[in-house]
Image: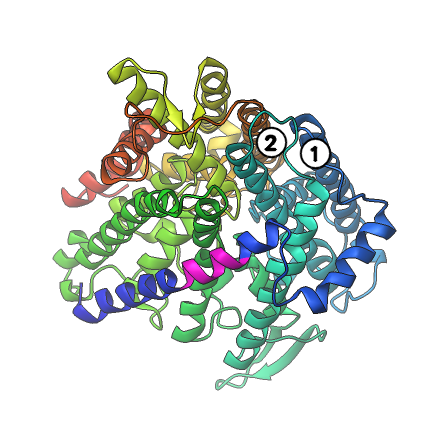
């Protein structure tokens, strides 16, 4: 570890901190339906979209209608994207002449992008045409992100309103998320990426002659536009197979900084938006503090583990001061690779600028554990906020049990119904991750897909289902995922991680909105102070992560201990 490395990390988090309030206030105005700086430009377009679509923006929906609209929209997106991938050979903008995807891979990829997971069992530059990348994947990068934001706003309104049956209008929230937030920011970031050297072209490839005189084909395409929304929407799906480790996706230290900043900015600011809309900014900062403490701790552990290096290599004469550089880009180094790895898994982004499977056992454990905590640090755009609010409800419920009072959160009494829905949501990840991992570890044809024997092989399987169910999309590497078994089961895990979580959350929103909003009393547990922040962190670690400890002990923990003992597999 170096002073320069820590300074790079500190400056990054400072830049995000400075952005949270202005961006959060802007989004609060957007979703409150107030006039913004972009209203003169986009207001007419928004109105026209509602008219053409037959949407009445003034008609609000109850939680069932809101949820049904979200599910119908997601199903329509699935059908459209699946058709594009299967019929790719017959569609335009296919300069490489790629054939359509196989049915199981098309299913996996479609589910992946519709659920904001962006797990990639394919090589982007060798599998997908420009049309599939733009009209298929990039479009879903916008829409799946907007869907998450919309549901977060619906849950936010449930805390604001009193004795009502409606939560807003899904079509309005989703449209505003795209028009006023994602699209303008994506245009700015894409132009910045182009200035930094990312390609933005409809050419298929160029041929170059290497220094040795050999001919090399270099893939090109509309990279910058997809890279921008990939990060802003916490999607993570890269244009190239090696994602942000590719020099055309992430050529310099400046583009690396912008990549990480873009993926974290909206998710962090949405928490401030929540505090602004519920009339309690201190509540927003309290939740941001809990997220920051856990995320920064994760960055520190990964950086320390990778800087410490591998004692087995040290014994072979490798310079110990270099740490572990396996699987990392020299232009980024350990500090910025550690920062990228922790942020992309604390979010549900999934983009990578290094090979997580090449990290030390402890360094690889942290990204996996951050996902297993529920993707709430701060999680995906929208999905991280409503996931964190589920943990907040569980925290005040536990505090209420301690003192024998009915728990309250932002003026709403939290009772048995909300806790049942919250536990249904929280149990989705462990049941899906551990269930599929256990089955795959027992099936010979599934085990045959791992790339490394011993505990690292178990980590490959565990990481894959953790990433899928958490709607993250990053990969540990080594696992051959493009098989019928993994394409199908990972796809099912993504669906469960997205929609089996969303539905209980919306049921909570409907229940809370119908309740009377009561003023705080002398017996109300304050939820915007340090005590609540500590309790929230404890609940996340216990309920979100403790159930995974036995599996982690058999995988990355024992691998790290074996490494320290000089044992290889």
- Asked if one can make out residue 233 in the rendered structure from this viewpoint, the answer is no
Which element type, helix, strand or loop, lies under badge 1? helix
Q: Where is 92 relative to 454, above or below?
A: below
Q: Residues within 10 Å of mark 1 (few under 14, many from 20)?
A: some
Quarter where residue 204 is shown: bottom right
Which sits earlier in the primary sequence, circle 2 or circle 1?
1
Q: Which residue is rendered at x = 53% and y = 30% of the image? A: 445
- Secondary structure mostly seen in magenta is helix
- 66 in the magenta segment: no
Closer-to-camera residue (139/211) = 139
**How far across and down, in percent of the image, does residue 336 sit?**
32, 64
Q: Quadrant of residue 167?
A: top right
Q: Which residues are magenta?
A: 19-26
- Marks 2/1 in contact by CB < 8 Å: the verdict is yes
Distance of mark 2 from mark 1, alpha carbons? 8 Å
Q: Quadrant of residue 406?
A: top left
Residue 325 x/y as whole percent: 28, 62
Residue pictured at 28% horizontal, 53% vertical: 299
Badge 2 element: helix
Q: Picture coordinates of residue 525 (x, y %)?
A: 30, 28
What residue did someone put label 1 on? 71
**In the image: residue 350, left or right of residue 207:** left
Residue 463's x, y, as percent?
A: 42, 39
Please indicate whether residue 224 sits to the left or right of residue 44 in the image: left
Residue at left offset 42%, top offset 41%: 376
Q: Quadrant of the N terminus?
A: bottom left
Q: Which is nearer the eye, 15 or 559?
A: 15
Q: Residue at x 61, y 67 (%)?
A: 37
Task: Tell me the residue that label 2 is attached to.
Answer: 499
Q: Is residue 21 magenta?
A: yes
């Amino acid at each position: 570890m170096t002073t320069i490395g820590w300074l790079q990390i500190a400056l990054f988090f400072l830049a995000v901190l400075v952005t949270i309030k202005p961006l959060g206030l802007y989004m609060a105005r957007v979703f409150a339906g107030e006039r913004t700086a972009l209203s003169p430009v986009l207001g007419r377009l928004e109105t026209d979209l509602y008219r053409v679509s037959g949407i009445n923006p003034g008609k609000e929906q109850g939680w069932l209608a809101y949820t049904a609209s979200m599910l119908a929209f997601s199903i329509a997106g699935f059908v459209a994207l699946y058709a594009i991938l299967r019929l790719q050979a017959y569609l335009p903008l296919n300069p490489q002449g790629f054939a359509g995807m196989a049915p199981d891979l098309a299913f996996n990829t479609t589910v992946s992008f519709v659920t904001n997971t962006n797990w990639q069992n394919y090589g982007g530059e060798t599998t997908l045409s420009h049309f599939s990348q733009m009209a298929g994947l990039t479009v879903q990068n916008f829409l799946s992100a907007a869907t998450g934001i919309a549901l977060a706003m619906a849950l936010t309104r449930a805390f604001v309103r009193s004795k009502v049956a409606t939560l807003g209008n899904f079509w309005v929230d989703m449209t505003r998320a795209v028009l006023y937030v994602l699209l303008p920011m994506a245009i700015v970031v894409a132009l910045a990426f182009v200035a930094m050297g990312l390609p933005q072209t409809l050419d298929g490839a160029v041929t170059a002659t290497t220094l040795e005189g050999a001919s090399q084909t270099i893939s090109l395409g509309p990279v910058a536009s997809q890279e921008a929304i990939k990060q802003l929407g916490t999607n993570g799906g890269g244009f190239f197979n090696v994602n942000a480790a590719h020099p055309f996706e992430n050529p310099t230290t400046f583009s690396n900084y912008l990549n990480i900043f873009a993926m974290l900015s909206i998710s962090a600011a949405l928490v401030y938006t929540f505090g602004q809309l519920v009339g309690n900014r201190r509540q927003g900062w309290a939740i941001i503090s809990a997220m920051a403490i856990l995320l920064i701790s994760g960055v520190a552990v990964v950086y320390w583990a990778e800087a410490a290096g591998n004692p087995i290599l040290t014994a072979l004469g490798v310079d110990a001061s270099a740490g572990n550089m396996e699987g990392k880009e020299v232009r980024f180094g350990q500090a910025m690779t550690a920062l990228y790895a922790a942020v992309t898994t604390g979010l549900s982004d999934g983009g990578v600028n290094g090979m997580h499977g090449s990290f030390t056992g402890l360094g690889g454990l942290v990204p996996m554990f951050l996902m297993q905590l529920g993707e709430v640090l701060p999680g995906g755009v929208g999905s991280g906020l409503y996931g964190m609010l589920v943990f907040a409800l569980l925290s005040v419920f536990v505090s209420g049990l301690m003192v024998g009072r009915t728990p309250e959160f932002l003026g709403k009494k939290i009772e048995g119904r909300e806790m049942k829905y919250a536990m249904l949501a929280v149990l989705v990840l462990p049941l899906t991750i551990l269930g599929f991992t256990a089955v795959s570890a027992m099936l010979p044809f599934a085990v045959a897909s791992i790339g490394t024997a011993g505990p690292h092989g178990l980590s490959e399987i565990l990481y894959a289902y953790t990433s899928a169910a958490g709607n993250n999309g990053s990969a540990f590497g080594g696992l051959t995922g493009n098989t019928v078994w993994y394409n199908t089961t990972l796809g099912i895990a993504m669906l469960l991680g997205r929609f089996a979580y969303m539905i209980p959350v919306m049921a909570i929103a409907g229940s809370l909105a119908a309740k009377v909003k009561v003023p705080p009393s002398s017996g109300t547990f304050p939820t915007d102070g340090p005590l609540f922040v500590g309790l929230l962190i404890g609940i996340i670690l216990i309920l979100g992560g403790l159930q995974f400890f036995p599996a982690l002990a058999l995988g990355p923990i024992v691998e790290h201990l074996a490494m320290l003992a000089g044992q290889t597999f």
